[in-house]
Structure formats: C-alpha cells, structure tokens
Image (spheres, helix red, strand yellow):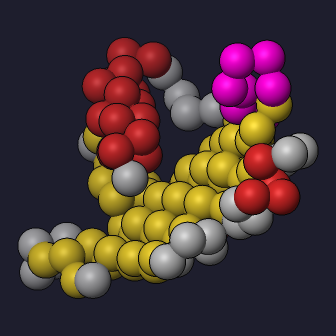
Amino acid sequence: MRIAVALLVALWATAASAGPMPEKFSAIYVVKKGFVDIGEVRRTLTPGANGRYVFESVTSTTGVASWVAKGSIVERSTWILKNAAIQPLEYYYERTFGKGKQVRLDFNWDKNTVTN
C-alpha cells in the first residue's frame, strides 16, 4: 500500500508541471535475492472511461520461490485528474499467499469520506 500511495503522491506532485498524462504505461521488473530470480512485478497505468485512470501493480513469485510461496499481491488504484491533481476514487489490495488479505477503500468526495 505504501508503494501505491508514494506513486500517487509522486504523480500528483508532477501532474501540474508535467503536461498531459500518458495514454498508457507498463513496466515489468524482476525481483531478485542475490543472483536468483524470486519474483516479478508488473505495473500498468491505463486510462479508462469518464477520465478515470487505473494504476495496477501485480507482484508474484517465480522460479524456486514459487515452490515455497505461491501467490501474488495485487494493488489497484482508480482515480481521476481534477484541477491538475490526482483525486483517488478507489483503492484495492489483495494478497493471496500466507494468511491472505483483501482491502477495498472507496472515496466519496461529495461527503469527504472513505469507506472500507
């Protein structure tokens, strides 16, 4: 969750001066422990309907690590760009290994509330 919040803050800080948002973004990172690949992180930023953007990060184990801890972590933020600032609409987190965990936050800007 900290990574998604940090990314949103970074995007917010640069949104006003950086010009238009990218149409699409994706990146794949390899997670290593020493010289061994143990996971993969896939990050995407996709524009959606009605000016919405979806930022998603999916981390999953690969190789030998997947024999020990099979699963993934999914973080997804849906937001709009309003007055050159990011306004979050929804945040979703799911961890499918270990004890597992699922969180969904909905932002209601008319009422200034967040529900879990």
Q: Give the range drawn in magenta.
A: 27-36
Residue at the far right in the pictured view: 63
Along the line of sight, the residue nearer the viewer: 10 or 15: 10
The majority secondary structure of the magenta stretch comes to strand
User: Does any portion of residue 47 appear in the rendered image?
Assistant: no
Residue 63 counted in the magenta span: no
- Residue drawn at point x = 70 percent, y = 60 percent: 69
Percent x, y of residue 15:
39, 28
Using residue 37 as the reference point, say whether residue 18 is left or right of it: left
User: Residue 49 placed where, x, y %?
Assistant: 63, 67
Q: In this view, does 64 lie above or below 50?
A: above
Residue 107 to residue 60: above or below? below
Q: Nearest the camera: 80 or 103?
A: 103
**Residue 110 falls in image quadrant:** bottom left
Image spot of residue 50 (x, y percent): 55, 66
Quarter of image, res 86: top left
Near-viewer residue (16 or 73) = 73
Is 92 drawn above or below residue 15 in the view shown? below
Quarter of the figure with residue 3: top left
**Is 96 displayed left or right of 110 in the figure?**
right
* 29 falls in the magenta region: yes
Q: Nearer the viewer, residue 84 or 73?
A: 73
Q: In this view, does 21 lie above or below 51?
A: above
Q: In which quarter of the image is the C terminus?
A: bottom left
